[in-house]
Amino acid sequence: MSTSRDLKIDGLKFIMIYCVVLGHLVYNDYGLLLNQIIYVFHMPVFIFVSGYVTSLKSDTKHHLHWLKKTLIVYFIAQILHLLYSYIHGYHFTIYNLFHPAIAMWYIVCLIIWRFAIWSIFKKTDDKLLFIISIVLAFFAGFVPIDDDISFQRAFSFFPFFVMGVIFKKRKLMERLEQIPMSYAVIALLVCAIAGRLFPQYYMPHLHYTDWNDPITRIFQTSIAFIACLAVVRLSRVDFTKHFARFGQYTLWVFIGHTFLVRENFLENFLDDHFGYELNIFEAQIVCIVYCFIFIGLAMLYHRIFDKKCSEHNN
């Protein structure tokens, strides 16, 4: 592992992908409570980290190469999801290929966010860009588009991505680390309690339908910003480094787990055949298993691929 990497950021990536998978599982009433808390911060933090690790030095050739690889991964996953739907009797058109399945919206948004940053970040003052991203996040809700091409999510989560990029560029992580841990703990607890006032899903993926929605988005986004910074601050400890080696494979987990949680297959199987519901502790075990299935596959892939590349170069 390269020593130039921020191991704490890699560790935080794994912790957040763990929360993403856990948030997609169905378990007993404690699960609803825990998921409502997780949904307050898990995607804002994950997207913040995505911005933090985005390189601003790469050239157009590198950008297009990354886009090609990412689109291949996206369409393979989408086709597999559509085949799954077809087998289970669902009808679909070519439009469904561009309508992200389950959590695949993140891939579409990541493409939009990175190319937006690569195109305008060096030409625009970063403070102004951050303000613009917040304004766009708010007013996007007035556009009558929901999940098509991940429209609402692309705009509403964009400020978190921009904040991650700015944190890396301005080296703000060092300043964040100066905030006492106790403050971060208190802030996260307050945000968790406040987040319980709203449904477990994160409002910014929906366009506004009445006057309550803009207020809800402002409230939830404000909470998410505070919770995001609190979680990042809490992650700046040596313990987080222990998860760093797994944090490099979060994309594998992110895409792979969408097939395992689809239709809540495991949970429905247990309920239909045994009348059994996962409890909060069993859900943790299932989450760990799901994560390491794809981390293991990723490690195996890289071991084989890197070996072949080495043999080819020799």
Image: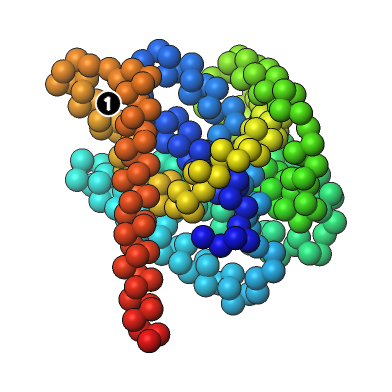
Instruction: Compare residues 311 and 226 and report the one nearer the observer.
Output: 311
The type of residue carrying mark 1 is Glu
**Which residue is depicted at the point 45% across and 18% down?**
32
* Residue 90 visible in the snapshot: yes
**How far across and how far down the image is residue 297, in percent?**
32, 54
* Dot 1 alpha-carbon crowd within 10 angstroms: few under 14, some 14 to 19, many 20 or more: some
User: Looking at the image, is 149 positioned above or below residue 76?
Assistant: above
Question: Split into 4 quadrants, where in the image is the C terminus?
Answer: bottom left
User: Looking at the image, is 122 positioned above or below residue 244?
Assistant: below
Query: In the current view of this chain or complex, which residue is farthest to the left?
Result: 273
**How far across and how far down the image is residue 119, in percent?**
71, 65
Q: Name the residue beneath numbered marker 1.
A: 267
User: Looking at the image, is 270 positioned above or below residue 87?
Assistant: above
User: Looking at the image, is 214 positioned above or below residue 243?
Assistant: above
Instruction: Compare residues 46 and 64 and report the one nearer the observer.
Output: 46
- Dot 1 falls on a residue whose secondary structure is helix
